[in-house]
Image (cartoon, rainbow, N blue to C red):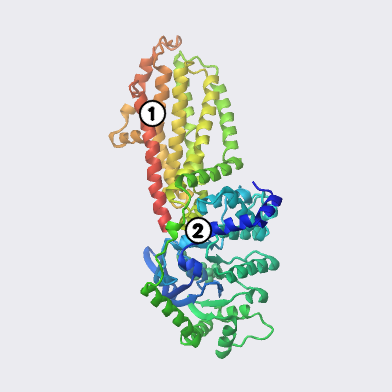
Amino acid sequence: MLQMAEYEELSESSKFTESFKLRTRSYTRWSPTEEGVKLSWSDVSVYTRLREKGKFKYKRIINGVNGAVKSGSLVALMGASGSGKSTLMMALAHRNSGDITVEGDILVNGRQLGDYMKYISGCMYQEDIFVGSLTVWEHMNIMSHLKLDRRFSSQDRQLRIHKILKDLGLFHCLYTRIGAIGSNKTLSGGEKKRLSFATELLTDPPILFCDEPTTGLDSYSAQNLVSMMNVMATGGKTILCTIHQPSSEIFAMFSQIILLAEGRIAYMGSRSGALNFFNSMGYPCPSAHNPADYFIRILATPHGFEENSKNVVKKICDNFSVSDYAKEVDVVVQYEFHMGRAGTFNEFEVRSKFKEARCLTKLYFLIYRWFLDILRDPTIQILGIMQKVGIGLMVGLCYSNVDPKTQDGIQAVQGMAFLLISENTFSPMYSVLETFPKDHALCIREYQSGLYALSTYYVSKILATVPGLLIEPIIYVLIAYWLAGLQSTLNAFFFTVLAAVLTMNVSCACGIFFSSAFDTSAMAMQYLIPFDCIMMVTCGIFINLSTLSAIISWTKYLSWMMYSYEVITIVQWQNVKNITCSPTSQDLPCLTDGEEVLEKFSFSKDNLTKNLFAMVFLCVAFYVIGFFCLWRKMQRK
Ligand SMILES: Nc1ncnc2c1ncn2[C@@H]1O[C@H](COP(=O)(O)OP(=O)(O)OP(=O)(O)O)[C@@H](O)[C@H]1O
C-alpha cells in the first residue's frame, strides 16, 4: 500500500497524471460521456404494487412528469417528505426496486434508458450500507476491484483511492473500521456518508445520483461536499441530488432546481426563475428567508391542513405545467427525443469499452470481504469454536467411563453417535437463519448496480463459511470421540469425522435454503422447527425405521441425520464381536455382536457409501433450491 508521501510524489508527476487520465478515459470513452450526459424524460409515471385486503393495487407515486437536465449541471431535487424525490431519482438512475413499475420515456443523450445506466452512473443511496467490520481502506480496495475496469494497474487503483479519500477528508481514517450500529471506534455518520460518496466516485462516472448526500453532515462538511460536487459539475459531470433544507450557501451552488409535490413537478429551472415563478403565483419569498426552505414550506401538506395545502400544490403544479418555464423544458425534451430518434449518436459502446472485473476476481474479493467479516465477528467464529470445544469436552467426559462391549455400552455408543450428529445439525442450521441474510440488503444494492451476479454473491457467501464448517465439526469430534473411547481404528474415526462434517454442511445448506425461501428469519424458523422434528424422529434412534408408518416413512430419505447416524453406527459396530450380556438381567434381550446391533436399528453395512453420497446430494440440492428462492426474493426487492 502506498504511503502518503509516496502518493503525493507520484500524483504530482506528469507521468502519473497522464496514465491516470488515460485510464479514466478508457472506461468512460463513449460519445455521450465525452459530451457529458443529458437526461430527459417525458410523461414519466411511477407506480408501486401494494397488497390491500388480499388484493394487489397500484399506487401512483410519480404522476406523468416531464423534465430535462443538461450535462454539467448540479441539480437539486427538492420537495416535502414523501413528495416522490427518491422514487423519481431511482427511476432516472434505473435502479428501481422489484415492486416499482415505471411508465414513460427516459432518455440519456436521446437514447432510451437501459441497463447500461448502471455502468455509466454512480448512485449514492439515502441509507448507507457497509460491511461494518472492514476498514475504510479495505472497503475501498475491495470496491475498486469490483467496480473498476480490470485493466487498471494496482498502482493506479491505489492512487485513485488515496486521491478520493484525501479530497473527501477521509484520509485520516484509512485504517478505521467503518462500524455497524452500536459498535465503538467507528466512522461517524458524516464520515460514512462521505465514504459512500467516495465509493461512487471510484469509477469517475459521468452522471451521479445522490439521495440526500448531506443528511447527517455538519454545515461545514455539507458545504464542502456540495462545493466538491459543484466543481465536478463544472468539469462536465451531471449530478442530481435530493436534498432537505440546504443552507442558503449550499442552495446557491445548484445550477438547476426541481421542486416536486405530490408526485408532480411544481417547478423546474434556475433558482432565480423559481423566485419569480412563486412570486407570480402570489407566494413571494420574504427577503430574510432561505428560498429552499420557503419553497418546501409552501409545497408541504402539513397535518390538519391537508385540503388547503393540496389545493395550493395543485394550483402551483397546474400553473407550472403551462408556464414558460415548463415550455422551455419541453423544448429541450422534444429536442432530445428528436435527436435520439434521428440516430445522430453512435451506438453505445459502454459495455464493450469497459472491461469489468472477471467473475473469479469478483468471487475472490467477495469471499475475502465475508471472510474478514467472519474473522472479526467473534459471535460468528471464535465463540462457535469455543462452544464446540466446551461441548466436546463435556460430552466426551460423560461417556469416558463406558465399556462399549456391553449392553449398556451399546446404548452409550448410540447415544454418543446421536450427540455427534445433533450438535452438528441444530446450532449451524438455526444460526445461519440469522447470519446468512445479514448482507442481503447490501447485495440487493450492489446487484442492482450491476457489480456482480447474484450467483457470485451466493457462492461467495457459501464458500466463506466453508472453513468454519470444516473446523468446528472436526474439533468437536476430535475431542469427544477419543474421550468417549469410541472405536480406536483410524477408519472408524475418519468416517465419523466425515459424517460429522457432512452433517454440518447439509444442515447449513438446509438453513440457507429456509432463510432464502422466507422473508424473515422468524418466519423461516416457524417452518424449520417442524421440518427438523421430522428429520430427528426419522433418524433411527427414536424408532426402528422398519416400523415407521407408510405415510411418513418416505421422509427418512430427506433425513441427513438418518444417513449420518447409520454411517456412524456402521463404523462403530461392523467388526465388533463378543459383546457381553448383562449377568444380572438374564431375561433381557442380549445383542452379542456388531451385526446384531446393526440389525436392531435396521441398518446395513452396504449403505455406508450410499449414505455419504446421499448427504452430498442433499447438500447440493439445498444450495441449488436455496439459490432459486433467493433469486425469486431478489426480483421482488
Ligand atoms: N416501494 C414502495 N412501496 C410503497 N410505497 C412506496 C414505495 N416507495 C415509495 N413509496 C411511497 O411513495 C411516496 C414517495 O416516497 P419517496 O421515498 O420517493 O419520497 P421522498 O420525497 O424521497 O421522501 P423523503 O424525503 O422522506 O425521503 C411515499 O409516500 C412512500 O411511502
- Identify the residue position indicated by label 2 in the image: 27
Callout 1 environment at 10 Å: few (<14), some (14 to 19), or many (20+)?
many
Q: Is residue 59 visible from the viewing direction of this image?
A: no
The C terminus is located in which quarter?
A: bottom left
Is 476 positioned to the left or the right of 116 in the image?
Answer: right
**Residue at disc 1, secondary structure:** helix
Q: Is residue 296 above or below residue 20?
A: below
Q: Nearer the viewer, residue 26 or 73?
A: 26
Q: Position of residue 630 (x, y in %)?
A: 42, 50
Q: Nearer the viewer, residue 581 or 22?
A: 22
Distance from Cα at disc 1 to Cα at disc 2? 49 Å
**Residue at disc 2, secondary structure:** helix
Q: Earlier in the sequence, mark 1 or mark 2?
A: 2
Q: Position of residue 21 (x, y in %)?
A: 57, 59
Quadrant of res 195: bottom right
Q: Label 2 is placed on what type of residue?
A: Tyr
Q: Is residue 298 above or below residue 597?
A: below
Q: Is residue 532 visible from the viewing direction of this image?
A: yes
Residue at 47% x, 17% y: name it: 490
Q: Is residue 451 above or below residue 110?
A: above
- Identify the residue position indicated by label 1 in the image: 612
Q: Position of residue 209 (x, y in %)?
A: 53, 66
**Which numbered disc covers residue 312?**
none
Q: Label 1 is placed on what type of residue?
A: Leu
Farthest residue toward the front?
A: 15
Q: Position of residue 309 (x, y in %)?
A: 53, 82
Residue at 58% x, 70% y: name it: 233
